[in-house]
Amino acid sequence: MSLINEDEALIAAALKGSAYAWEKLVKRYENRIYNHGLRLTGNSSDAMDLTQEVFLGVYRNLHRFRGDAKFSSWLFRIAHNKAVDLNRRKHLLQAQSRSHGDEATDLLDTLPATSGQEPEQELGRQELNRRVIGMLSRLSLAQRLVVELKVFQSLTFEEIGEMQDISANTAKTRFYAALKKLKIAAEENHVVS
């Protein structure tokens, strides 16, 4: 059974009240959604909040999934919208904090450990993740979303455009502009390091 057919079967069972089917759907996608959120938000706390919001929204609206697209596409569309909302709320809170004279800080949380890895490997993985997240944080949210969807979710520019309500050419333009910024940032870091 293909992944798409299995998703459809799990959705049908979950809609009939199967807790097992719902849990299996969540387990299938929770790490991908969390990692998606981590790369978009830059910290694990926001990524966890985003993951919870996405699955809560999916749970409440599963009956609205029409099957016109793959379930994963629908799920990442919801994650995209929630990430944009989270980013707006965060900027609003930071602006309010600054207007009240508070110091607004956004620290990168430690990434959760992957079980079964040696401590040196885990430390190396965490350092690489910090660097990737730091580099992505230099991009605008629109550019980060395109990079996330193209590189980490392997979507086509057409799929990205459809998901973000932009043309495929706009998605390409944002992607290549982001790559240019990342290249410049990488060169600056290499010289500084």
Image (cartoon, rainbow, N blue to C red):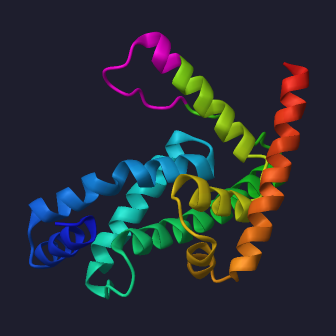
The quadrant of the rendering that contains the C terminus is: top right
Nearest the eye: 10 or 3: 3
Q: Residue furthest front?
A: 1
Q: Is residue 118 above or below residue 157?
A: above
Question: Is residue 112 located in the magenta-colored stretch of the structure?
Answer: yes
Nearest the eye: 114 or 182: 182
Q: Quadrant of residue 133?
A: top right
In the rendered structure, the answer to whether residue 150 lies left or right of residue 122 reads: right
Q: Main secondary structure of the magenta part?
A: loop
- Residue 73 lies, in percent from the top left, at 43, 72
The quadrant of the rendering that contains the N terminus is: bottom left
In the rendered structure, the answer to whether residue 96 lies left or right of residue 130 reads: right
* Residues rendered magenta in the picture: 110-123
Number of marks drawn: 0
Residue sitting at x 15%, y 78%: 12
Residue sitting at x 46%, y 67%: 76
- Residue 137 lies, in percent from the top left, at 73, 46
Q: Is residue 52 visible?
A: yes
- Residue 109 lies, in percent from the top left, at 57, 33
Nearest the eye: 87 or 105: 87
Q: Is residue 14 above or below residue 96?
A: below
Question: Is residue 109 located in the magenta-colored stretch of the structure?
Answer: no
Residue sitting at x 88%, y 42%: 184
Q: Is residue 100 visible?
A: no
Residue sitting at x 10%, y 60%: 20
